[in-house]
Image (spheres, rainbow, N blue to C red):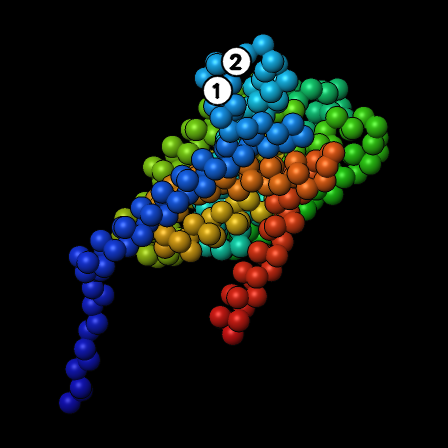
Amino acid sequence: MATPTATVVARPPSGPRRSRRLRTRLLVVVAALVLLALALVLGLAVGARPVAFDDVVRILFGGRTAGDSADVAAVIDLRLPRTVAALVAGAGLGVAGAVAQAVTRNPLADPGILGVTSGSAFAVALAVGFAGVTAASGWVWFSFAGAAVATVVVALIGGSGRSGASPARLSLAGIAFGAVLSGITSAIVLADPRRFDAVRAWEVGSLADRGWASVGTVAPFVVAGLVVALIASRPLDAVSLGDDHAASVGVSVTRTRIASLIVITLLAGGATAIIGPVAFVGLIVAHAARGLVGPSQPWIIAVSTLFGPALLLLADVLGRVAAPPGELAAGLVTAALGAPVLIAIARRRRVGGA
């Protein structure tokens, strides 16, 4: 006679445990808000011409005197537009990284792994080299279009074949297509370096001289991407646990992947259009958010929306003071910070999986 086996049923977290986890997540959100507020203050006050915090507040609210002209120019004309640009681009990159990691089920993913940033850079190179576009406000739309086309191509390549789309296929298609576009972009730029002087700051991810025109153009698309990301966060929760699990709870894997690719295009494409192909922001922010609030996608997206701008603003501030009298582009600072983080994550996961 066969011995009956016991069935183990996973129990939901108890009331005290749920309450404790909710408190922890709320504390993380509050800490992220405080960090973002600090980054905003530093972004407006720190630079080649330091401005005291009380003077920044007074200038922002219109309390100006005759001797404030230099401070007003520094805060209102120079730092405020680049701070708002960092808010928009940082939120876009942070949430795009969270969605990319969920849809590919790869904790080392960021928007670049799906070819989005390479598509933007390629389109800008075409605009400058062959369409004669020289102003940043002109190549914003080309950057956006390049991101959209790259996402569609990667989706088609990753979804071809009998097995259809999968996280691994999407990742490999994005990496391969992005590498091809990066190589072609480099060849175009090297063919006539003088013509591409205007976009060199954009290519390294600089927030300097980012005017209201480009921010105003891109911001609605980023806001739309954030809204779609929040709507898709629950289905994305299921997809991040596996296709079979998602299907078993009634989630359409195909629709969720399509929505995720749209989100990544809107967010990463918009951010890249403003500040260029900045690396590692999505990777660092999404990984930190998941480590602090757990695997819940709604909470990861909410925290990434705050951590992304904070990280980009702090990188920009650090770049302003790191090499006086000049400054380092924020993209160079995030690359310097992100590379060690990526190595540490990869080593930890390799050791943990060994």
Residue 70 percent location from the top left of the image: 64, 18
**Quadrant (top left/top right/bottom left/bottom right) for the N terminus:** bottom left
* Along the viewing direction, whichever of 54 and 132 lies nearer the viewer: 54
* Along the viewing direction, whichever of 167 and 9 lies nearer the viewer: 9
Vertical placement of residue 226 versus 250, above or below: above
Few, some or many C-alpha atoms within 10 Å of disc 2 (few <14, some 14-19, many ≥20)? some
- Of pointers 1 and 2, the one earlier in the residue sequence: 1
Give the residue type at disc 2. Arg
Vertical placement of residue 7 versus 343, above or below: below
Residue 256 percent location from the top left of the image: 39, 43
> Quadrant of residue 33 in the image?
top left
Check residue 58 in the rendering and tell me which mark sits there, or answer none. 1
* Along the viewing direction, whichever of 88 and 239 lies nearer the viewer: 88
Give the residue type at disc 1. Arg
Q: Secondary structure at mark 1?
A: helix
Q: Residue, x 58% and y 27% (percent of image)? A: 51
* Along the viewing direction, whichever of 123 and 302 lies nearer the viewer: 302
Q: Secondary structure at mark 2?
A: loop
Callout 1 touching callout 2 (CB < 8 Å): yes
> Quadrant of residue 324 in the image?
top right
317 vs 298, left or right, is right
Alpha carbons under labels 1 and 2: distance apart: 7 Å
Check residue 13 in the rendering and tell me which mark sits there, or answer none. none
> Quadrant of residue 127 in the image?
top right
> For mark 2, what is the residue?
64
Q: Residue, x 34% and y 37% (percent of image)? A: 231
Vertical placement of residue 353 versus 196, above or below: below
269 vs 179, left or right, is left
